[in-house]
Image (cartoon, rainbow, N blue to C red):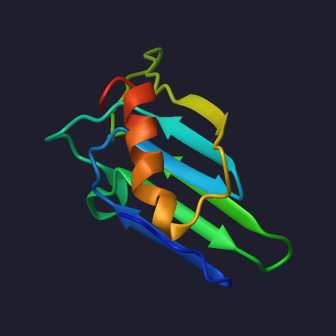
Amino acid sequence: MIMKFQGGVGKIGSDSEAGWLAYAKDDIVYVKEYPCFPGEEYPDDGCIVEVYVSTKDRPLVELEPLSPLKRLRPGEEYTFTEIWHLFKYNKPVTEREIEKVRKIIEARLGGS
């Protein structure tokens, strides 16, 4: 899914099992890599990822991979690990460049 920010405030969720989310600003690309657990129960009506945007006080984009719901007993722990990547593209990322950037990201992440 590709989302083009038009200003304002909003949040969108998806059941994407791609294992990564990306945000591009000019020629900088920020990627969050995360594990997916198909078949497990996720919060917010099954959302695996959510993206929140706002220009209310200052421009803000939040990329939020979600963990499946887990019931823990006292003393138990659960870890949900995200790996963050930041790279510079050779020019500003435009709608025409999105497919090229997606292929670069997938190659860097090992074909996710």
Above or below 84: residue 45: below
Can residue 53 be seen from the camera position used here? Answer: yes
Q: Quadrant of the N terminus?
A: bottom left
- Between residues 40 and 64, which one lies in front from this camera angle? 64
Q: Quadrant of residue 109?
A: top left
Q: Is residue 47 rendered to the left or right of residue 55?
A: left
For the point 71% across and 58% down, which residue is it? 26
Numbered-mark total:
0
Whether residue 66 appears in this view of the structure is no
- Report the residue that reaches farthest toward the left: 39
* Residue at the image position 48 percent from the left and 66 percent from the top: 96
Name the residue at the top extreme: 75
Q: Which residue occupies the foreground of this view, 107 or 81?
A: 107
Residue drawn 28% across the image and 56% down it: 15
Judged from this view, the residue extending furthest toward the front is 90
Q: Which of the two residues, 89 or 111, is positioned nearer the viewer here?
A: 89
| Residue 69, image x, y percentages | 33, 41
Q: Position of residue 75 (x, y in %)?
A: 47, 14
Q: Quadrant of the C terminus?
A: top left
Residue appearing at x 29%, y 52% in the figure: 16
Please state if 45 lies on the left or on the right of 21 as rendered.
left
x and y percent of residue 76 in the render?
Answer: 43, 16
